[in-house]
Image (tube, rainbow, N blue to C red):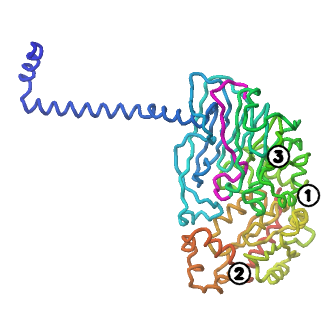
Amino acid sequence: MKEKDLLYHTILARSFSKNEQKRLGYGAFIASLFFVFTLCTIFKSYLNLLPTMDTQLSVDTGLRMVRVTETHKSQAFNSNYTTTSGASESLISPTTQNNITSNVTNTQRLTSSEDDKLSVCNDTSLPKNYLDLFNCTTPTSISNEQSASDGNKMDETIKCKKQSRTEICEFNGDVRVHGKSATILSTITSAFSGNSTWQMRPYARKGDLVAMNRVREWTVKLIQNADHLENANFSSRCVRNHSVPAMIFSLGGYTMNNFHDFTDVVVPLFTTARRFNGEVQFLVTNKNQPWINKFKEILRSLSNYELIYIDGEDETHCFTTVVVGLNRHPEYFKELTIDPSHSEYSMSDFRRFLRDTYSLRNAAVSTGESLRRRPRMLIISRARSRAFTNTDEIANAAGEIGFEVVVAEANTGVASFAETVNSCDVMLGVHGAGLTNMVFLPENAVVIQILPIGGFEWLADTDFGRPAKGMNLRYLEYKIAAEESSLVRQYGRDHEVVRDPSAVAKGGWTAFKAAYLVGQNVTVDINRFKPVLAKAFELLQRRQSV
């Protein structure tokens, strides 16, 4: 033993007994462990940055995330498509790569860093209080607010915005579209490592697996130099050059359902295309001729050019600007709504556009002393499901209160039915796509929604209640009693279908839909319903500023 060691042990022996020395050693060991644990806790967040950066680079090969802002709210999404909650926006641009490298060149979807997890049913039409009963939860992600920049000047060639319900990218410069291969090539002037590639489905109901599986997937490829375009998988030589911007959007998904026609396509198309003042070329994927015939007036009002069914085009179309996808309200559970804080336009602008497109005369209903005629009420009839079985009794009751009553089914063509709706002061109907026609009502008109049994409160408010208020319409709701439903006569008052809709929901969306949406009609109790009619009449007598 060395002299200094002997001296150390001698001093230690004089100061402490053997037991005290042992306890001192244990204490020192525990203190060391605590010190190591403290260091790990402090530096954990810094250590986690390394795999996060690696993930970001592998997804956005050749791209740098320059801004991502998100405001979280509790929403539900599907994991098959990257979704976000609340107001989410991602602007992505290529920049010069300084000391950043990535060997990953595989095809990737545009995505942000993952942090939180939520669950979702594929069919978002389901009432919220039943979501947990359908055994359809799948993990997805929400990104926290983050930003990254390498200090270089941002290249404005590409701008991509990711929101909970949609992805939209705008490409500027030399942009080439080949329909047959569903490929978009865009040249980038800034240097970056490799070619960046990802897929997009240009339909504004991201997160809904059923809808998105009916939408054609497009591949986006970024090429650093225009000379490299000749090396693409298809003939990239420009065959048709266009002098106006292009927009690619899908007519797949849930189109030809009137509610989804408006909330998934028409409203998003308006907010995306209106800024071009008609100088834009529509490139339609998932050709849907009945839809095009149905909304031909809207298409003509938004574009001065004959639309192109791009899917079958084997020639390469070249543009200086191409927009892929459509804008939509940034919040997941917002239907038939435009958020003016995220758009150049509002719902008032959209409804004004509809009045101009269909030459509708009435911008607002007459109220109070200026109402010199009997107010008109439109009762929307349905031929198959959720139909009124006593329409005549409802019409007579409304007439006794003071309404002039019109009964019509929304199957006469958009232009004709829009004129009918716009001529009325009140619209009454059972929950369903027909109520979407409230977009044609004059401001200050009244919407009355009839709720069948089945727990439709949340769905009714999301689809029509809140949107109606956002259109400056007055909204009334009537929830039928069990005795007013045809299900009582079919199953009996004590049957599970009538007594406990949540139990039916456990059987899945198909069972719920069959029981309450397809298999149910309504016989309104006139005495019980009359106060609602009277309230609608009273609202029209009040003076209310527009």
Does residue 512 sit above or below 15 in this rendering? Answer: below
Distance in Å between CA atoms under marks 1 and 3: 32 Å
Magenta-drawn segment:
188-210
Of tags 2 and 3, the one toward the viewer is: 3
Q: Main secondary structure of the magenta part?
A: loop
- Label 1 Cα neighbours within 10 Å, binned few <14 / some 14-19 / many ≥20: some
Residue at image mark 2:
528
Q: Quadrant of residue 138?
A: bottom right
> What secondary structure is marked by label 3?
loop
Q: Amino acid at mark 2?
A: Arg
Q: Position of residue 137 (x, y in %)?
A: 54, 58
Who is closer to the viewer here, 535 or 449? 449
**In the figure, is residue 43 to the left or right of 213?**
left
Quadrant assignment for the C terminus: bottom right
Q: Secondary structure at mark 2?
A: helix
Between discs 2 and 3, the one toward the N terminus:
3
What residue is shown at x 80% (from left), y 55% (from top)?
287
Residue, disc 3: 313
Name the residue beneath numbered marker 1.
358
Q: Position of residue 498 (x, y in %)?
A: 60, 80
